[in-house]
Image (cartoon, helix red, strand yellow):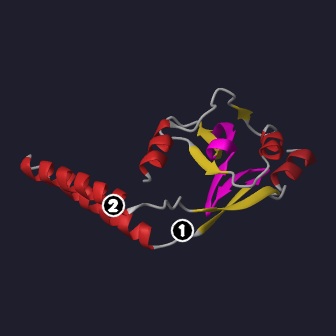
Amino acid sequence: MDNQELEQENTPIMEIISWEIPEYQKHSRSKLWYILASVVAIAMLIYAVSTVNFLFAAIIIISGLILIINDARNPQGVLVTIANEGVMVGRRFYDYDELSTFSIVYKPNIGVKKIYFSFKSKTKHHLAIPLLDVNPLFLRDNLNNYLEEDLERTDETATESISKMLKL
């Protein structure tokens, strides 16, 4: 091993940019939303009990409890750091070796400002991080040094769109 390789191994992790995001998006929901959600949940519970599918009933009840608990508290802040070695979200570090591509979907007129990271592993989905007030051009220029940019992604995922529409 020569000196240059030793220097690269001992290179400290240098932060490029960091910002804080909420751990989840808190929606403002009307009374009508809660009434409709309750009616749907009760209908699904009746179906689950009538088909003797108690696991489905348990999932509905647990989902409702999680929704109520998350609605009662405010989301905590999570620090996102883009560094020369990878991406840190909270306490979880994603090395650039784990990631295959990144894409930035920036449409502030419709409220979409996110960066997506795709994993090399097919068993992992993507990682979506809100950009908030981060300059997407600065982020893009720096990430291009480490990852390939996926220019084909131009919109947020369908599940995120549906989740936003249903305020889940």
Q: Give me the residue at 36% from left, 63% from top.
A: 31
Residue farthest to the bottom?
Answer: 73
Query: Which residue is nearer to you in this view: 30 or 103?
Result: 30
Circle 1 sits on which residue?
Answer: 75
Q: Judge the density around disc 2: few (<14), some (14-19), many (≥20) Cα neighbours within 10 Å.
A: few
Q: Judge the density around disc 1: few (<14), some (14-19), many (≥20) Cα neighbours within 10 Å.
A: some
- In front of the other: label 2 or label 1? 2
Circle 2: element type:
helix
**Residue 98 seen:** no
Q: Position of residue 78 (x, y in %)?
A: 62, 64
Q: Tell me which amino acid carries mark 2.
A: Tyr
Q: Tell me which amino acid carries mark 1.
A: Pro
Q: Is residue 100 magenta?
A: yes
Query: Which residue is nearer to you in this view: 147 or 107?
Result: 107
Q: Specify start and end residues of the magenta stretch as a single range.
A: 82-111
Circle 1: element type:
loop
Q: Which label was assigned to residue 34?
A: 2
Residue farthest to the right?
Answer: 3
Residue farthest to the top?
Answer: 152
Q: Position of residue 4 (x, y in %)?
A: 91, 46
Left-right relation of 59 to 135: left
Q: Give me the residue at 51% from left, 41% from top.
A: 125
Labels 2 & 1 near each other (Cβ < 8 A): no
Q: Quadrant of the N terminus?
A: top right
Q: Is residue 99 magenta?
A: yes
Q: CA distance from mark 2 to mark 1?
A: 20 Å
